[in-house]
Amino acid sequence: MTTTAVTHIATLVTNDPSLGDGTPLGLIQDAAVVIDGDRVVWTGETSKAPATDNAVDAGGRAMVPGFVDSHSHLVFSGDRTQEFHARMSGRPYSAGGIRTTVAATRAASDEELSANVARYLAEALHQGTTTLETKSGYGLTVRDEARALRIAAAHTDEVTYLGAHIVAPEYADDPAGYVDLVTGPMLDACAPYARWIDVFCERGAFDGDQARAVLTAGLARGLRARVHANQLGPGPGVQLAVELGAASADHCTHLTDDDLDALGQGDTVATLLPGAEFSTRAAWPDARRLLDAGATVALSTDCNPGSSFTSSMAFCVALAVRDMGMTPDEALWSATAGGAAALRRTDVGRVTPGARADLVLLDAPSHVHLAYRPGVPLTHAVWRGGERVR
Ligand SMILES: [Zn+2]
């Protein structure tokens, strides 16, 4: 195996408090990272770096772990520009929202859907996202949900079955029948391609009892749980997620004190998706309140064509710092180690010996610039699994 050292990193974020300065980010100044194959094998000060086959001079730039985007919806077709334009122009928009994307996705060929996933994965990778979860949820038939997951699984290991996104239009008058489908034949067809099961637990989608039925059916099939919870209003989603040991409760915009206590005491990660609030002009989730309650917080894009069409983790970091009460250090941690926790991964989201060599070199001397210079493309170089991809 060939070893490569990246040297003269102005500030290295390791996300290991036992390294560097002792903070949660484990910062090391004038640092070096040694890669062997697809793994990090050494981190420390440049002056102490071991000899390697190759060297790359970081030139005083900062390095952070590759972003871990633990929540996206990339298997879709079509476009909802008009819906966004109407919403941002103050006009009511009554066309079908998610249903519009469901119709377009069902009509698309496998090749179109696969090309779309590849396109947005490449877009995210170009911006430093080296681990990305994605979901079904725009098929809502046995065939279309299984197809979406098969396509997603060809592009990423983190695949989530979200047949319970909304009640399929064909079952508008029979939501119980749709839950039976999602927990029966659709689950049978989808489970082989998925690692996770998810449900949109929200007024207008699935209530607490329906969400429980969906999640317990998935758990019984060996899938692990994550939940769309408390996005549009208070509800049972967060409590259900914690009770069932879900890895993550996603959105967490409307939380009661009991919800906060549950997230603070359990090990369900609170995943915040500020792109959704940005793109719908909704109130921000209160990250400060969650952190002060002791919750583990992740940041993700929720990339989807309706409510959050961004693949930029840096943008989410900037929003979290500006509007959600996070410090720049907390936001960076949540976009890397937090996302890894939300996916129950220990091999990504950190730059420590043994971790996968997923590294982002920034055109800036510090990770703080991700929030300090919002909207500016700061990605200088990206390694994924030890391979330089940008
Ligand atoms: Zn979502």
Image (tube, rainbow, N blue to C red):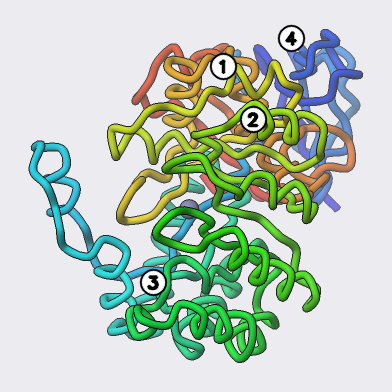
Circle on res. 334 = 2
* Relative height, residue 8 to residue 76 (above, below): above
Q: Where is residue 323, by image quadrant? A: top left
Which badge, 1 or 2, comes first in the chain's sequence?
A: 1
How far is the residue under mark 2 from the one under mark 3? 29 Å
**Amino acid type, mark 3:** Ala
Residue 344 screen position, x and y as percent: 78, 49
Helix, strand, or loop for circle 3? helix
Q: From the top left corner, tell me how far across and down residue 193 is, in percent.
A: 65, 78
**Residue 295 against residue 330 in the figure, above or below:** below
Q: Position of 98 compared to 196: left or right? A: left
Percent across and percent down for residue 317 are 50, 26
Q: Secondary structure at mark 2?
A: helix
- Numbered label attached to residue 29: 4
Q: Nearer the viewer, mark 2 or mark 4?
A: 2
Q: Earlier in the sequence, mark 2 or mark 3?
A: 3
